[in-house]
Image (cartoon, grey):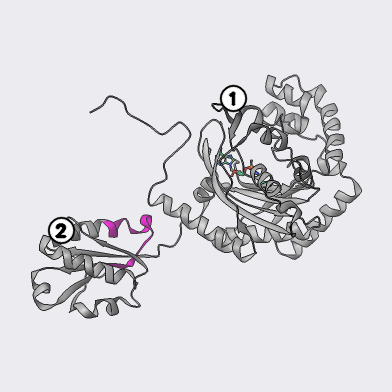
Amino acid sequence: MGAVRYRAVKGTRDLLPPESERFADAEATARRVFGSYGYGEARTPCLEATDLFARSVGETTDLVHKEMYTFLDRKGRSLTLRPENTAGVVRAVIENGLATGPMPLRLWYAGPQFRYERPQAARYREFRQIGAELFGVPGPAAEVELLTMLFAFLGALGFKALTAALNSVGTARSRETFGKALKAYLEPRSSGFGEDDRRKLAENPLRLFDSKDPAVRAALEGSPRTVEFLDAESRRHHDDVRRLLAGARIPFRDEPSLVRGLDYYTRTVFEVVSADLGAQDAILGGGRYDNLVESLGGPPLPAIGFAIGEDRLLQAAPPPAPSRALLLVLPQGPEDLDEALRLAGDLRSGVSGAVEVDLLARGFKKGMARGNALFEEASALGLDREKIYAVLMGPREREEGTVTVKRLASGDQETIPRSGVAGWFEGRT
Ligand code: HAM
């Protein structure tokens, strides 16, 4: 044995069955629900030019300032493993000419993102997001469609009691006025701030809302709020959004201190926090970014989107009802293996679930022991106990041209003609 033991890099993890199945199911649900709203899938590279994130997410955000995986490639170009997907999607939309094409443009995505954060429960350095971006709609209909679709997705995963926290951060200009007022308010109260928060106060006071330091939190109590600084049009937009969301029965509440940790937002911002995650971690966040396309070199184009932290989502999600069927085809000995493989092949086309052959032909006893073990673990594996069967094939069955089917939930067994097996399982899986 070699002396080296390899381990997954800190903050990353392996997704293996049955956990990996839940991720695949959530992504399939996203594809189905988002697809039903006309959203098509975008797959953009994990690697982008570093400057893309500095320009979009913002130089002074925690994300760009201290959480990016940035390196020089062999030609000395600065590249970054994407910490989020909005910037990449916007780049792709501009680069591929979609920004000047038919509007609205609707895209969704699912994939890994990378942030150099301190790993803890539900916080990873490689994590997955499922998100959507809607381009070309300046009015509140965009907010309504996006949030309706988001809650349809959350509902399809079995979430019932989630509420979106909603706020408006206004335009770049109203944000600037707000930032000045915030700075003026906080400066005399900042003696207890750490070095990093002092930097934020000087460079980008809005980012102090991201701070977890109790001294900063206390200073922010009673501080000015973004909504007090909205220009008339942003205020009207915000009021319309709230009215229409209420009409569409989207569960939301006003959250005047919500500003989100990325600089590209304009007007509407939202987050969903789940109490099930222990810490006050958001399972998703999003908002409008009406200036981003233009600031990355595209035409003026309003846009809005969200990203769900898939790892957090599944941690908070109610466990899915186990639904898969499993047929274990058990050849008694090696001489039964051929026929077992053939039968399994016949069954797969009609059975919704897995048909597994004991390729080691260990005999009925060992085969049933494995079947019973799977039966015990069924719900964790997503298996419906009522739909777990063993199909036994031994010398007797070979001679008679039959198989013996055993339903594990009841222990009942029945010997049926080989030619009728597929039909027997119809309606049973
Ligand atoms: P974000 O708030 O930075 O927004 O991330 C969205 C979600 O990703 C978070 O709410 C959280 O659930 C998840 N997440 C973030 N960091 C981690 C981590 N280290 N481990 C596990 N999950 C994490 C964005 O990324 C924006 N691009 C959202 C957006 C799309 N805005 C407009 N369009």
Q: Position of residue 161 (x, y in %)?
A: 60, 57
The residue to which callout 2 is attached is 361
SS at circle 1: loop
Residue depicted at x 14% and y 77% = 401
Q: Nearer the viewer, residue 171 or 291?
A: 291
Q: Position of residue 39 (x, y in %)?
A: 63, 60
The residue to which callout 1 is attached is 76
Q: Quadrant of ligand 1?
A: top right
Q: Nearer the viewer, residue 9 or 189?
A: 9
Query: Which mark is first along the chain, 2 or 1?
Result: 1
Whether residue 389 sits left or right of residue 85 in the image: it is left
How many labels sit on residues? 2
Q: Quadrant of the N terminus?
A: top left
Whether residue 16 sits left or right of residue 420 in the image: it is right
SS at circle 2: loop
Q: Position of residue 33 (x, y in %)?
A: 58, 63
The region drawn magenta spans 374-389
CA distance for labels 1 and 2:
57 Å
Q: Is residue 57 magenta?
A: no
Q: Residue furthest front?
A: 75
Tell me the quarter of the picture where residue 105 sits.
bottom right
Which amino acid, mark 1? Gly
Residue depicted at x 77% and y 61% = 141
Q: Position of residue 127 (x, y in %)?
A: 52, 41
